[in-house]
Amino acid sequence: MTEQNNKNKKASPWKSIQLGLAVLFGIVVYAYGFQITKVDLEDLRSERRQESLTRVMRALAKPEIFEYEQTEEIVNSPVYITCPASGEPTLPEPDKSGPYLVIAPACAEPGETVQVEGFNFAPNVSGPLRFVPGSDPANVVTLGRDNVETDASGHFIYEFVLPERPSDDVQFIRATLKQNVGAPRLTQTAKDTWEKIVETVFLALLATTFGTFLAIPLSFVAARNLMKPVRSPLASIAFSLLGWPLGIVIGYVIVRFVEGLSAPFAGNIPINLVSIIAAPALMIFGLRWALPQEELVKPSTSMQLMRWGVLFVSVLLGFFGLFQLADLSKNLGQIKIESFEWLAFLGNFLFQTGDIVSIITPALGGLAAGGVLSSFMGKIGQRTTEKLSPATVKLFNIVFATLAGATVFGLLGLLVEWLYQIGNPTYTVWGPGITGGVIGLALAIFTNPKDTLPTGLVIYYVTRTFLNGLRSIEALVMAIVFVIAVGIGPFAGMMALALHTIVSLAKLYSEQVESIMAGPLEAIQATGANRLQTIIYAVVPQIVPPYISYTMYRWDINVRMSTIIGFVGGGGIGFLLQQNINLLNYRAASAQMFAIAIVVSLMDYVSSVMREKAV
Amino acid sequence: MLQIKNLTKIYEGGVKALDNVSFDVPDGQFLAVIGLSGSGKSTLLRCINRLIEPTDGEILWNGEDITKASPEEMRRIRRKIGMVFQHFNLVHRSKVITNVLAGRLGYINPAWSLLNRFPKDDIQKAIKQLERVGIADKADHRADELSGGQQQRVGIARALMQDPDMILADEPVASLDPVLAHSIMKHLEDINDKDGVTVLCSLHFLDLVHRYADRVVALNQGQLVFEGLPSEIDDKKFKDIYGRDAERVG
């Protein structure tokens, strides 16, 4: 131990030099930083800057929220700029029964300082002092920066500089003192701010809601611990890859067919009503029959086929019901409820929801069919791998992996073509197609046909890359794109924030999924639960509290972000704030800043209460 | 009948957790698995329901090779094998009854799980299992509100929900005090006696082995070093299992 100390002592000069160098290096770094960021307090010392700063700070401290009905007391007093040749003029005695001004001296050169004294005004009122030229009474000049203020006895005294307006005629000094009367009322600024802050909160709410819904499934795919055990044989991968595009096309066509069936009854509210009740009822009945809750023995093949049939019809019925629901809500939304004008927003909501449903239903159908067909074909691939001999599986792999690789890369090529309009099919279709085919072929040849490949990890890395890429694009930039897509307004801002919410929440969520306790996961798997069930019963209960707190935090971020989004036309309070800052209307800007601060702190309080309830 | 044949597990990184282990377990037997920490007991039990993929060897259960089962077949096999864990492995934030019902997941159509629905019969059954382990009054409590002993009973009720033919118990009493340990072991004994469920239970304490087990297998560094009746473990065998420096306690 002592030896250790001695050693340290011996090394100490060298260590001191090292430390000294480190400090020196630090100083150099910060010195350069000062140079780069132009740290300079010289400007701050100038009186002009200090004056402006004081003015702005005072304006910011007084948000323009309340105003009063005002009465004005206007008093004029004559003054001569350049004294007349006849000497100092005699001014008429002011009427001392009311408010009056005394100017001393009553004549002076332009630029000279004159004192004005006011008497008999109302106590504690304020207002500007103005100069009224005799020749042109409409062209008044405000004197000085500050308003004059009377004391408790209605008296004020003020010194000012005479303007460069020499004239032989009599000119006037006018005091306009304003008095607040009655109760305070909200200013127009306050009303606008209220309207926009409501818009901001809802914009953030919708963005957070939509973002959260899509981020949750993504977060499971982006969680390493869930994806790592997912492995499947090449045949299964190839088949499910082929299943996706095929299923999407088939699903889209079928759902469009159902839409065609539903279209003739679009405008008929009674039929809409009947079908939105009957279709889901029949669908649930069908699903209940086709998907028994528990099955102890394996059903016969014919029974299974029948179930698939019923399942298919039930799902079609469901889509029919969705289209009818969309039509119904559009129809209801269009009914003008004359006496309930204030309910118009509900009508709009119904109409817009109906519109959204009718637009996304075919896409939904395509995706659902894609997923179903892909998983079904994946299972066929799995079975094939299990049942056939290695040589046959190899042959099978060679054919289908090549096909799948070519299809996927070909489709990617088409996407590239659409984005960049290269116009040369050799590069955009055949090239990628052949490359994909070769990759598939190579995989099929060089892997053991019965081995499983880490599908999960590949999906994990692809998702992560995609999320990180999109996350690095600021919501502000996204807002610019959406403003171009859907026009200026809160909708564009909402879309931009929602997209950014999806990618950033998916990342945060997935890290929570990665840190859950593995024990329950293992226990649920051991009961024979499949992957979906494991997620629902072992993962979801563990991640509810962090998901809620992240979601609330994101809402808070979105409220703050939506103040910025407005700068590029994304709606919300930011637009108003930017406008007022540009107009140098600091008291109005201050009202908006206070509103944001209040909303953000309220949300913090609400979120802490909600977290407490949920955990 | 469970037959383990030449079972070997080598982890990534080359650690040989199981080395050519073979033994049979007749139906209805209470088999204790003993050995030092790290001797491969947990790996052995987890290989049987393939929570861990064995590297080599066969596990035949009623003639069917578990190591070759497809995911679909594995679901069917796993639902007949209950598992009880040292750290109970309950989902803390879920209710006790939900934790017990989770034992049914291997039987339930996943589409219904999406809606978090269980058949009425299963719910009644879950209450019965909780009554059997003596904590029916806790059904609506959150799992993490329960004490350790109570949590392990929930774990047993969950395994019972599977209508198991076999229960794998991985040091089920290692986190409990001796009194609770006996009460948990008695539940396992009861299930073994009354329901004829085969039990494979890894244990640390030899007195528990003597008291409850029909037969013992012992592992040392992944190798099977003893197979026989609990009463056959004499001082020499003890040193084979636990190493030369080990002292018998209790």
Image (tube, grey):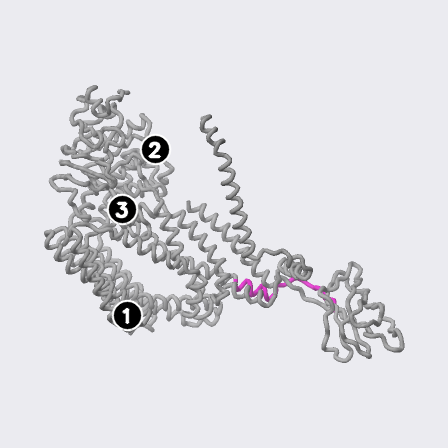
Give residue B110's position: percent from left, percent from top. 25, 51
Q: Which disc number belongs to residue B148?
A: 2
Which one is in front, A530 or A261? A530
- The magenta segment: A176-196
**Rendering quarter of residue A211:** bottom left
Give residue A505's position: percent from left, percent from top. 40, 54
**Residue lying furthest top in this view?**
B235
For the residues labelled 2 and 3, the Cα–Cα distance comes to 29 Å
Is A186 colored magenta in this rendering?
yes
Left of A118 or right of it: where is A583? left
Where does label 3 land, which residue?
B120
Where does label 1 land, which residue?
A259
Q: At 42% across and 57% down in the image, what residue appears? A: A208
**Rendering quarter of residue A92:** bottom right
Q: At 78% across and 64% down in the image, what residue appears? A: A158
Left of A43 or right of it: where is A235? left
For the residues labelled 1 and 2, the Cα–Cα distance comes to 57 Å
Give residue A398's position: percent from left, percent from top. 15, 58
Q: Amino acid at mark 2?
A: Gly
Which one is in front, A205 or A351? A205
* Parent chain of label 1: A
* Parent chain of label 2: B
